Image: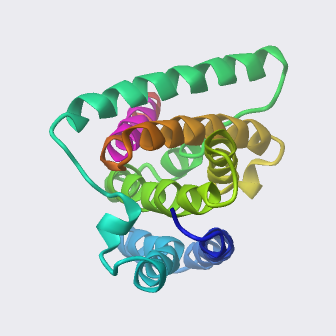
Amino acid sequence: MLPFPVVVGAIVILFASLVAQRRLIDGLVDRDWNVLIDMLVSAAVGYGPSVLWMWFVSRRWGTGKLTADLGVRFRWQDLGWGPLIWIGTHMGVAVAVLTMHALDVPYRGNLEAQVSTSPERAAVVSLVVSAVILAPIVEEALFRGVVMRGLLSKTTPPAAIALQGVLFGAAHVQPDFGRESIGLVIALSVAGIGFGLGSYLLRRLGPVMIAHACFNGLAITVLLVQVY
């Protein structure tokens, strides 16, 4: 476990980074830069500060070995556990989305706008790399490796798993979506809880990184089929 202050630092830094990232994206729209450069700069601003925070947490409260301190470990059986966690999490999200539709809660996928507004091949490739590789690694290390471990030092496992899931969902809010962000936060909170439960039970992040990659990969595939 990690001390609770790491949770506060992680959340403050992440949300500040996301605000800066969105402001940066708005500014880059008017510049005639290559879309790959736009994506690289955006990823650096959005994820860079959190990576530095995790490195600091490891040096300050851990052993200095980042992957070991955060539980970033892989085993061959994770090739089976990852898809199983993904299936369970996907089913949970599907139930949540169907329930929201029945209750008329507005919902819109967070990757939808990125694909539909930037259908160029370079933009799609950049999005796939970001969503299927970068996001599963950085977000799992941050939320399940740092935030959940910090919460476990102050609360019970069920509460820690639930709270980090809600924070994970809130981190994906899209202001431009308006009321549709409500359903998005709920759906991704369910996903965050599923990933949190998997990492807690297996005591490592390898399986949930694979599950997260599968989760985002399926979402992008469905959207690309619809767009193209």
Task: Give x and y (percent) for residue 174.
Answer: 70, 54
Q: Which residue shows up at 32% across the image and 29% down it? A: 83
Q: Position of residue 141 (x, y in %)?
A: 43, 60
Residue at x-position 46% and y-position 59%: 145
Q: Residue at x 24, y 28 (%)?
A: 80
| Residue 213 belongs to magenta span | yes
Per the image, is 100 magenta? no
Number of marks present in the image shown: 0
Residue furthest to the left: 76
Q: What's the coloring here? A: rainbow
Q: Where is residue 12 drawn, in percent x and y?
A: 69, 74
Residue 135, compared with residue 104, is above or below; it is: below
* Main SS, magenta residues: helix
Which quarter of the picture shows residue 149? bottom right
Seen from the viewer's position, the closer of residues 153 and 207 is 153
Which quadrant holds residue 110? Answer: top right
The part of the image, by quadrant, that contains residue 68 is bottom left
Query: x and y percent of residue 39 in the render?
Result: 42, 68
Boundaries of the magenta span: 208-222
Compared with residue 183, is residue 1 higher up or lower down, i.e. above or below? below
Q: Is residue 111 left or right of residue 129?
A: right
Choose between 15 and 3: the one closer to the eye.
3
Q: Name the residue at 53% across, 34% down.
A: 194
Farthest-out residue, top: 102
Q: Is residue 197 left or right of residue 125?
A: right
- Asked whether residue 225 is in view, the answer is no
